[in-house]
Image (cartoon, grey):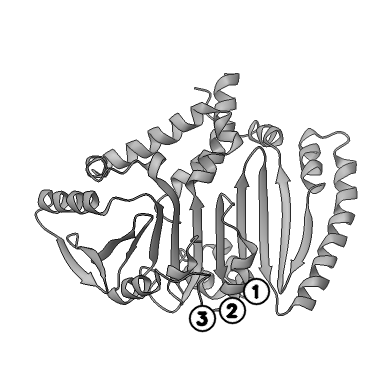
Amino acid sequence: MQTSRKLWIAAVCAVAMVASVSTVRAQQTNLLPPDSELVVTINFQQIMKSEVVKANKAILDIVKGKIDEQLDEKGLAKYLKKAGFDVFRDLSTITISIPADRNPEEGFILLEGTFDAEKIEAAFTDASKDAGGGLKIVMIGNAKAFEVSPKGEKSMLVGVLNKKTLIACLTKKDFGDAVARSGAKGAGKFKSETVTNLLQTVTAKQSISFVATSKVLGKLAENAPEGAPQAKMAVEAIKQMDGFSAAITIQKDIDVQLGLNMKDADTANKTAAGINFAITLFKGKVDDMAKGDEKAKVLADVMNTLRASSKGPNIVINARLTFENLGKLLQSLPLPNN
């Protein structure tokens, strides 16, 4: 039982990645559409090489089993094999960006890793034959795009830009613009100043990072089921800020980061000072609670690592949760024992 629980505690650090594998800031932000206002990245290889995962080999088995199961269920496993693509060996990062002024479905997907264009084309061709058609190869700019048209669904364009980059999107304009920018260096240029600012708060070394404007979050939140008070409260809270970022870095411990975009650097600096003052006051109360409460001791440990700082017009709040304390928190959850 102890071994099983330890396994589940460790696995929680990686399973979130699997649950989000179809929905994920690009290392190559210059490829993303300029009107992107939500950008999420999962750094697959960083997680797999983290101390937590390496110290708990069974995590790899859990994650690999889950991914293989999903690929088999969707009939994708045999095509990936033909494409010579192994998720654990060849995939580095997964990114999805979503625009605010267009249909959210017109998102942009970026995969970074190792890709063999010829084998991928052969795999796409086989998949099209098995499905009775639905695949067309078109040239957009100087890149070959596979136009995939599943029955009853919108067509998607998929293309290998180079040995390390694969993109997918719905519109030829987004695909063509990415092809035109693929040789450029430096960060992407976005219409939203908030996105540009917040991308400075996240790094390529983080396991999972998220950047979004209040505009796109409000739009997505408004699609929540009617009558959900939590959703309505979230929409109102979101409207009070320009945008925010969030990131988790899994290594020996788990570093959590939250970024808030303010109107200017002076406001950010003053607000960060106010947050640190509030943390100091609250920490004293938590320390008193921790004298006789094990759960409060965990909170006290986290509070000791909680800090706010300013970075230009952004506020960055950092905290650290040790693997040991994560285990203590999860012990009270109804986790499987087998």
The residue lying toward the viewer, choosing from 175 and 272, is 175
**Tag 3 secondary structure:** loop
Q: For the point 66% across and 37% down, which residue is it?
A: 252
Q: Position of residue 113 (x, y in %)?
A: 40, 50
Q: Mark 3 highlights which residue? A: 191
Q: Amino acid under label 3? A: Lys
Give the alpha-carbon distance from disc 1 to disc 3, as whole Å.
18 Å
- Which tag is nearer the camera, tag 2 or tag 1? 2
**Tag 1 secondary structure:** loop
Q: Amino acid under label 1? A: Met
Q: Position of residue 316 (x, y in %)?
A: 71, 62
Give the alpha-carbon distance from disc 2 to disc 1, as whole Å.
13 Å
Q: Earlier in the sequence, mark 1 or mark 3?
A: 3
The residue lying toward the viewer, choosing from 157 and 138, is 138
Q: Can you say which quadrant of the picture contains the N terminus?
A: top right
Q: Position of residue 225 (x, y in %)?
A: 45, 63
- Compared to 106, does 160 lie above or below? above
Give the alpha-carbon distance from disc 2 to disc 3, as whole Å.
6 Å
Q: Amino acid under label 2? A: Glu
Name the side, left or right, on which 89 lies relative to 140: right
Q: Mark 1 highlights which residue? A: 241
**Tag 2 secondary structure:** helix
Q: Mark 2 highlights which residue? A: 193
Q: For the point 54% across and 45% down, which residue is it?
A: 46
**Is disc 1 in contact with disc 3, using a CB cutoff of under 8 Å?**
no
Q: Position of residue 315 (x, y in %)?
A: 73, 67
